[in-house]
Amino acid sequence: MKAHEYWSVGALITMLGTFYSGYKGSKSSHKYFAASSLLCMIMAMYTGHRLISKNKKTEKESNSIENEE
């Protein structure tokens, strides 16, 4: 859960940097902010997916244990 929050905050910060550098017209820093924003968004989606799939897996296991009893 913590990793997902950190990647999400990082994506937000780099998106703000991308908008600001685009507004100022700094093309070199804009490219770096955009690439890092893309990386952070991919990692945030990946960690969020792992978080959701882990919860579904534990929910199925708890349901199967209850059905056995």
Image (spheres, grey):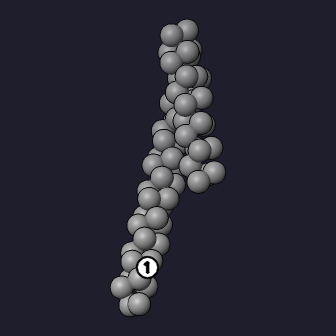
Q: In the rendered view, does 56 fall on the left or right side of 39?
A: left
Give the amino acid type for the residue marked by disc 1 in the picture.
Glu
The correct choice, above or below, for 62 with respect to 6 in the image is below
55 vs 31, nearest the viewer: 55
Q: In the rendered view, does 1 fall on the left or right side of 62?
A: right
The location of residue 23, given as percent across then percent down, is: 51, 10
Residue 27 visible somewhere in the drawing: no
Q: In the rendered view, does 49 fall on the left or right side of 6?
A: left
SS at badge 1: helix
The correct choice, above or below, for 53 with respect to 31 in the image is below
Quadrant of the drawing holding the N terminus? bottom right
Label total for image: 1
| Residue at the bottom extreme of this rendering | 68
The location of residue 16, given as percent across then percent down, is: 55, 22
Report which quarter residue 63 is drawn in. bottom left
Residue in the image at 45% along x and 49% along y: 45
| Residue at the top extreme of this rendering | 24
The correct choice, above or below, for 25 with respect to 1 in the image is above
> Which residue was labeled with disc 1?
61
Report which quarter residue 30 is drawn in. top right
Residue in the image at 46% along x and 64% along y: 55
